[in-house]
Image: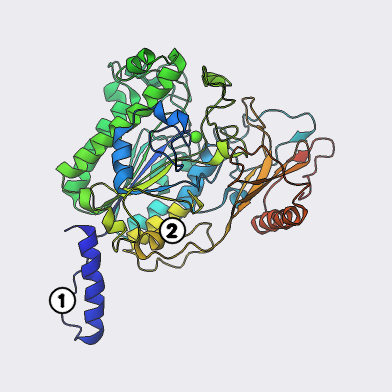
Amino acid sequence: MKLGHALTLLAVGCLLAACQTPTQHTPVPKPSNIILILVDDLGWQDTGVAFTPEPTSFQARYRTPNLERLAAVGLRYSNAYATGSVCTPTRAGLLSGEQPARTHITDWTLHTDRDFSRKMPDLADPDWCKTGLAPGPLLLPELLRKQGYRTIFIGKAHFAAIGTPGADPRNLGFDVNIAGHAAGAPGSYYGTDNFGNGADNPWAVPGLEKYHGQDIFLTEALTLEMERELEVAAADGRPFFLDFSHYAVHTPIQADERFAPAYREAGLDNKEAAYASLIEGVDHSIGRMLTKLEELDLAENTLIVFTSDNGGYSVGARGQTPSGTGAGTHNAPLRSGKSSGYEGGIRVPFVVGYADDAIRGVTSDRLHSPGQLLDTPITTNDLYYTFIAFGHQYHSPPSIPYREGVNLSKHWRLGLDIPPRVLAWNYPHKWGPKGDRYEPFTALRDGDWKIIYWYESAEWELFHLAEDLGERNNLMATEVEKAAQMQDALREWMRLNNAQRPLDRASGQMLPIP
Ligand code: CA
């Protein structure tokens, strides 16, 4: 039964139940399976799916026919954001529903006693939560497991530091963990390198020993594991939650030779051809997933969400600027990239859909047309309440203490508006690589307006994103009233979330709320 029909039956069943005896049968739909495809460091325009009314130049570079197929029957969000500007804050936020500013998991984790942030002359990092995400009963996979879900993790975890319980997804509510651990990058994408295993290497990908020595790319090994896990889940019969978090397209930018030659022939240099091949490898995996879901008769009842954990990487291993384009960043027309408070650091692709044309299950009353581009600002933390809602078949989930985010399923299924709200980001660190304002910041978006406070220069910037997506025209001096209102909103958000600021190096004291 297609989910759309099932929902209609449920609605009819509820109406009948109100006026008939309780002994009559009310059809109950099977809970939806839930798949999250989280790509690492994938930029807003790094696929062929457009998140703007008109495609941008970078989108023509990448071949992603399978994601485009999913987007054509699903929904796209043009103003989707990662909760953090680097990996761990977003990932921990997604599982906990908690805002990184509040948990103080504000930077990427690896060691419990030190981090990799860049030293600043006058400022220092606050005492942030270097251990990362801790186990707890309110984590998303725990709540879904309690609802009878089989919970599967595949790929890059990067939830918590080496030696802590949270480093293993099985301690966070996942029944199965394949290849996830503390580190946030693969030692190598190549099976011939044993994915970095051999030497004492914290980046060595665990759990894929059967592929060691083979001529196989990491994305393909994970895809084979995904296919097998879907078969196991189908045989198991329970609904499942699959968090498929690709190591791709994070550094090292290594070529997937199944796909790289075509990009070289198209004129991309080796580095950019390798990057494009990482993306196409993920897309190929999506195609295999859709085929497998159909084979297993799971396609009609499986929600798929595709997004990234932070803005596109545009520095270091990719070079500071994209070759041959004249653009200042690989994320143009967005400004800057991963780690920055500008849009390039936080805006991400976001596609939601059912695997077949039953997106009308999500949009059961044709509230949205297939392939529609929505402009409501959303954040990856919204997936916490959204997935819980699907797990509870849209009925009210259990009482949960305050979490950031809203239940998007109400928006998809019932057309209810997402209430106006501010979205904000707090990153009191200076990321390792150098780039365009890779600096400590707090930023807040309200409607089309966005304000950023930069701690190193003690400077405010105010932008109107609808008119200035590239964030070049600072309106602090000309939009005085709006600027004051946005400053107040940012200060209030910081107080409510107990957001940390960098320390003044001379005094050792935390800087005041700006
Ligand atoms: Ca990342």
Residue visible at 20% across and 86% down in the picture: 20
Viewer-side residue, 190 vs 304: 304
Is disc 2 in contact with disc 1, using a CB cutoff of under 8 Å?
Answer: no
- The amino acid type found where label 1 is placed reads His
Q: Nearer the viewer, residue 503 or 279?
A: 279
Mark 1 neighbour class, 10 Å CA radius: few under 14, some 14 to 19, many 20 or more: few
Q: Residue 180: percent from the left, percent from the top?
A: 40, 35
The residue indicated by pointer 2 is: 385
Question: Taking 420 as reference, is 458 left or right?
Answer: right
Q: Is residue 108 above or below residue 467?
A: above
Residue sitting at x 58%, y 40% = 343
Identified at 26% across, 46% down, the residue is 355
In the rendered structure, which disc, 2 or 1, sits on the residue that comes first in sequence? 1
Q: Position of residue 65 (x, y in %)?
A: 30, 33
Residue nearest the viewer, comparing 151 with 201:
151
Q: Secondary structure at mark 2?
A: helix
Secondary structure at badge 1 equals: loop
Q: Which residue is mark 1?
A: 25
Above or below, comparing residue 297 to residue 326 in the picture: below
Query: Which color scheme did the rendering employ for the protein?
Result: rainbow
Residue drawn 19% across the image and 74% down it = 26
Specify the amino acid type for callout 2. Answer: Tyr
Confirm whether residue 406 shows in the render. Answer: yes
Within the image, what quadrant is residue 333 found in? top right
The location of residue 402, given as percent across then percent down, is 54, 62
Is residue 269 found left or right of 480 in the rendered image? left
**How far from the left and from the top, in percent, is residue 430?**
67, 33
